[in-house]
Amino acid sequence: MAKKVFVAATGQNCGKSTVCLSLLHRAAKKYKRVGFIKPLGPKLVEFRGCQADKDAVLMAQVFNLGDDIRDMSPVPLYPETTRKYLDGEISPELFGEHMVSACRRLEEVCDFIVIEGAGHAGVGSVVGYNNAQIAKILDAQVMMVAEGGIGRAIDSISLNLCAFEQAGVPVRMLLVNKLLASKRDTTLHYLRKAFADHGMEIEGGFNYSPILANPTLKRISKILGSSLQGNDHELHRIVHNVQLGSASAQRVADLLEDSTLLLVHSSLDELMVMLASLYHLPEFREKIAGMVIAGKSPVSPITFKIVNDSHLPYIRTELTNTESFTRITSDVSKIIAEDTEKINLILHLADVELDFDAIDAMLD
């Protein structure tokens, strides 16, 4: 009989997919065959001739599980699915049957299965199966992932626990993620006090990491709707700082931090030429991740030639600097299979920071 852990979360962006990657990595060292399933798939991508949830595709690519992709994402939610369900065109029991059947097929060939929920505990209610109900029909032990903090964390954890209590499904462990290293012990201390009567173990997950939290140039190009030019070898470079290039050229150079993306208006030829020149210098290569040339004003041909000849990565957009800055800074970076630096870091941290033995013991 395969061990099954249902990874729930208090909301989006808690690091749930990071935890799932880590669990599969550690489990693969102990068990002969590991599996993954995202029962409800709200965010679909094309993979091997079918539409599957992007998290299922990520796990399939990283752990070579592609042959099982249809069972890894048994209920893809298309744009029209909700309406069809509410209009009675889809049987209420159909989704549950698909999830249970897929999980049983994986159980027949796997020793350890990670089941990833979608969003907070209530997600899926619109089609009759929220996370708590899915954990129940799949007969899986539940681990809830929460973002670090005290007051707000306690509120969101309490709210999500209600859904599992209503479904009669105990949450066996709370894994607290994105902890500030300086406050890790204090945060865990108070969370353990707050939930002392709930009978669940409370463990620390991963500390907050800028490398995991910050976007790559590829992600930023997608956000802005424009391709990366100048140097596509830098697609997966991680941007740690975003700076508006609105000051003088010298001031901008003085303010550069590690792996900075500069947003420059298309009329500022002098600043673009200066950045292209600095990019040639080794001491500035680590500071300049790339440049966004924003605005509808045309860039002079000679400036474009200088920028292209420097191989400085850049994105050209007709959005304003302010619009570009807002889109970039309000986006939450999601991991994809090509983010090898991020994935390698996650797997390393899983080896040194994740208490897999405690999680594994919870499933007995």
Image (cartoon, helix red, strand yellow):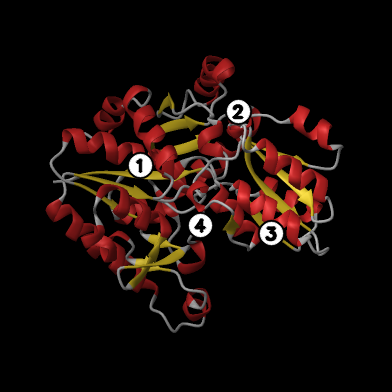
**Mark 3 sits on what residue?**
316
Q: Earlier in the sequence, mark 4 or mark 1?
A: 1
Mark 2 against mark 1, which lies toward the viewer?
1
Mark 3 against mark 2, which lies toward the viewer?
3
Left or right of 269: which side holds 55?
Answer: left
Q: Give the CA distance from mark 3 to mark 4.
A: 37 Å
Q: Tell me where residue 340 sits by quadrant.
A: top left
**Mark 4 sits on what residue?**
123
Whether tag 2 and tag 1 are in contact, CB under 8 A, the answer is no
Q: Give the CA distance from mark 4 to mark 1.
A: 21 Å
Q: Amino acid at mark 1?
A: Leu
Q: Give the CA distance from mark 4 to mark 2.
A: 23 Å
Residue 69 image position (x, y, % from top left): 28, 62
Q: Secondary structure at mark 2?
A: loop
Mark 4 against mark 2, which lies toward the viewer?
2
Q: Secondary structure at mark 1?
A: helix
**Mark 2 sits on what residue?**
149
Q: Amino acid at mark 2?
A: Gly
Q: Amino acid at mark 4?
A: Val
Q: Earlier in the sequence, mark 4 or mark 2?
A: 4
Mark 1 against mark 3, which lies toward the viewer?
3
